[in-house]
């Protein structure tokens, strides 16, 4: 009986540990992906040397301010 109880508790501990690790991996990877994409976008924008000008007020998203503008001019 004691041997069975030890095996049962050990099995339950392993199942709980694997469940916790799976849960944290799923939730953490989503946040990491968003942060990684934002960092890549920021690095690419700083190194490009392009001049971007946002003019007016409208429905186009300005890549600099993330606000709505009428025209976006990108000079290469």
Image: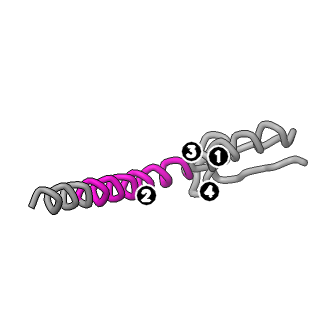
Judging by the rendered image, the residue that carries numbered circle 1 is: 56
* Disc ID at residue 35: 3
Front position among marks 2 and 4 = 2
Front position among marks 1 and 4 = 4
Does label 3 or label 1 sit earlier along the sequence? 3
Q: Are marks 3 and 4 in contact (CB under 8 Å)?
A: no
Relative image position of residue 74 (x, y in whole percent): 81, 49
Q: Secondary structure at mark 4?
A: strand
- Region of the chain picked out in magenta, as a range: 12-33
Front position among marks 3 and 2 = 2
Q: CA distance from mark 2 to mark 4?
A: 34 Å
Q: Are marks 2 and 4 in contact (CB under 8 Å)?
A: no
Whether residue 23 is situated above or below residue 65 in the rendered picture:
below
Judging by the rendered image, the residue that carries numbered circle 2 is: 26
Other residues around mark 4 within 10 Å, as few (<14) / some (14–19) / many (≥20): some
Q: Secondary structure at mark 1?
A: strand
Does the magenta portion include 46? no
Does label 3 or label 2 sit earlier along the sequence? 2
Residue at x 14%, y 58% (from the top left corner): 5
Relative image position of residue 32 (x, y in whole percent): 53, 47
Front position among marks 1 and 2 = 2
Q: CA distance from mark 1 to mark 2?
A: 41 Å
Is residue 64 or residue 71 the one in the foreground?
64
Does label 3 or label 4 sit earlier along the sequence? 3
Relative image position of residue 49 (x, y in whole percent): 87, 39
Residue at x 32%, y 53% (from the top left corner): 17
Residue at x 65%, y 53% (from the top left corner): 70
Whether residue 4 is situated above or below residue 73 in the rendered picture:
below
Other residues around mark 1 within 10 Å, as few (<14) / some (14–19) / many (≥20): few
What is the total number of numbered labels drawn onto the structure image? 4
Relative image position of residue 26 (x, y in whole percent): 43, 58
Q: CA distance from mark 3 to mark 2?
A: 15 Å
């Amino acid at each position: 009986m004691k041997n069975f109880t030890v095996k049962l508790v050990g099995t339950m501990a392993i199942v709980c540990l694997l469940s916790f690790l799976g849960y944290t991996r799923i939730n953490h990877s989503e946040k990491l992906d968003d942060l990684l994409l934002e960092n890549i976008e920021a690095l690419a924008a700083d190194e490009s040397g392009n001049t971007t000008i946002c003019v007016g007020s409208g429905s186009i998203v300005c890549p600099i301010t993330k606000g709505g503008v009428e025209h976006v001019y990108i000079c290469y």
